[in-house]
């Protein structure tokens, strides 16, 4: 008698996890470089013990959330005019030095620290293609970033920004809304990066589409909840009838 209730409950739990992912997408609709999260579902089969199923019976099929993944579709470019705002139009990620180690990001909104180091909003230092922090000496003017990541000022070339790809994209772990930990698989340098100066890549979240998905999910949640309530009432009525004295 519990099978229908348990199966519906597994669906409700999965829908709750999807709602969390959609809510996070909407919260980051304006976060530079953010990639929308998606949920991969699967079926978990319960065969009721090691024995074979009786003739005409079937295994119980529960809903299971297998994994979450990121949509790699690029976000729209947003022109800012800030010479240290950078966008990658092709494949790859910027590398930044954090207190936890090297991380990668598509969020290219950078600025200068007091010592002239180029860093993101959290103070993580932007790294060059040799793995060293990119730094501009005090008083330097005319900062330009070429399409291949070469940084120059009026006094000449300072270095080249490192752009890499992930060796195991599905194994990278998100840290916050902008950073990814490449994991043990590491990264590979992009030999011909495509950068745009004075612009940042926006989030690839479509707020209207995400809101529509959330509304659809809410209707499904209400339907399954109503089913759960009806099933609970049915079981209560059956128990009441069985336990009534003859």
Image (cartoon, helix red, strand yellow):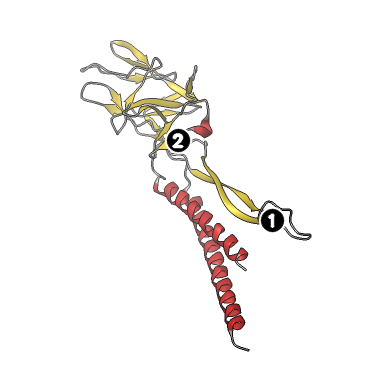
| Residue depicted at 55% across the width and 68% down the height | 228
**Residue 176: x and y, percent?**
38, 39
Q: Decide if residue 63 is on the left or right side of residue 84.
A: right
Q: Decide if residue 83 is on the left or right side of residue 182.
A: left
**Residue closest to the eye, 47 or 159:** 47
**Residue 73: x and y, percent?**
52, 37
Badge 1 or badge 2: first in the primary sequence: 1
Q: Are marks 1 and 2 in contact (CB under 8 Å)?
A: no
| SS category of the residue bearing label 2 | strand
Q: Nearer the viewer, mark 1 or mark 2?
A: 1
| Residue picked out by circle 2 | 173
| Residue depicted at 48% across the width and 28% down the height | 89
In the image, residue 145 above or below residue 32 = above
**Residue 60: x and y, percent?**
66, 57
| SS category of the residue bearing label 1 | loop
Crowd band around label 2 with a 10 angstrom C-alpha radius: few (<14), some (14–19), many (20+): some
In the image, residue 221 above or below residue 157 = below
Q: How many marks?
A: 2
**Residue closest to the eye, 80 or 222:** 222
Crowd band around label 1 with a 10 angstrom C-alpha radius: few (<14), some (14–19), many (20+): few
Res. 211 mark:
none
What is the quadrant of residue 149 in the picture?
A: top left
Q: Decide if residue 39 is on the left or right side of residue 154.
A: right
| Residue picked out by circle 1 | 59
Q: Where's the C terminus, which quadrant?
A: bottom right
**Residue 159: x and y, percent?**
36, 14
What is the quadrant of residue 30 in the picture?
A: top left
In the image, residue 220 above or below residue 172 = below
| Residue depicted at 40% across the width and 25% down the height | 95
**Residue closest to the eye, 149 or 230:** 230
């Amino acid at each position: 008698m519990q099978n229908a209730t348990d199966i519906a409950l597994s669906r409700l739990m999965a829908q709750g996890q999807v709602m969390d992912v959609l809510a996070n997408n909407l919260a980051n609709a304006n976060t530079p470089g953010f990639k929308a999260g998606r949920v991969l579902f699967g079926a978990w089969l319960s065969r009721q013990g090691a024995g074979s199923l009786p003739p005409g019976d079937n295994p119980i099929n529960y809903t299971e959330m297998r994994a979450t993944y990121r949509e790699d579709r690029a976000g729209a470019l947003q022109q800012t005019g800030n010479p240290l705002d950078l966008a990658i139009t092709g494949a790859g990620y910027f590398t930044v030095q954090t207190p936890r180690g090297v991380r990668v990001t598509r969020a290219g909104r950078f600025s200068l620290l007091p010592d002239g180091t180029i860093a993101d909003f959290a103070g993580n230092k932007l790294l060059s293609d040799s793995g060293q922090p990119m730094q501009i000496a005090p008083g330097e003017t005319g900062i330009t970033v070429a399409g291949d990541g070469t940084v120059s000022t009026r006094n000449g070339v300072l270095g080249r920004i490192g752009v890499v790809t992930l060796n195991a994209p599905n194994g990278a772990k998100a840290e916050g809304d902008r950073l990814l930990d490449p994991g043990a698989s590491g990264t590979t340098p992009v030999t011909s990066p495509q950068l745009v100066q004075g612009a940042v890549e926006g989030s690839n979240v479509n707020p209207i589409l995400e809101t529509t998905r959330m509304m659809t999910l809410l209707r499904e949640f209400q339907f399954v909840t109503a089913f759960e309530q009806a099933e609970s009432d049915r079981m209560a009525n059956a128990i009441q009838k069985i336990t009534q004295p003859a």
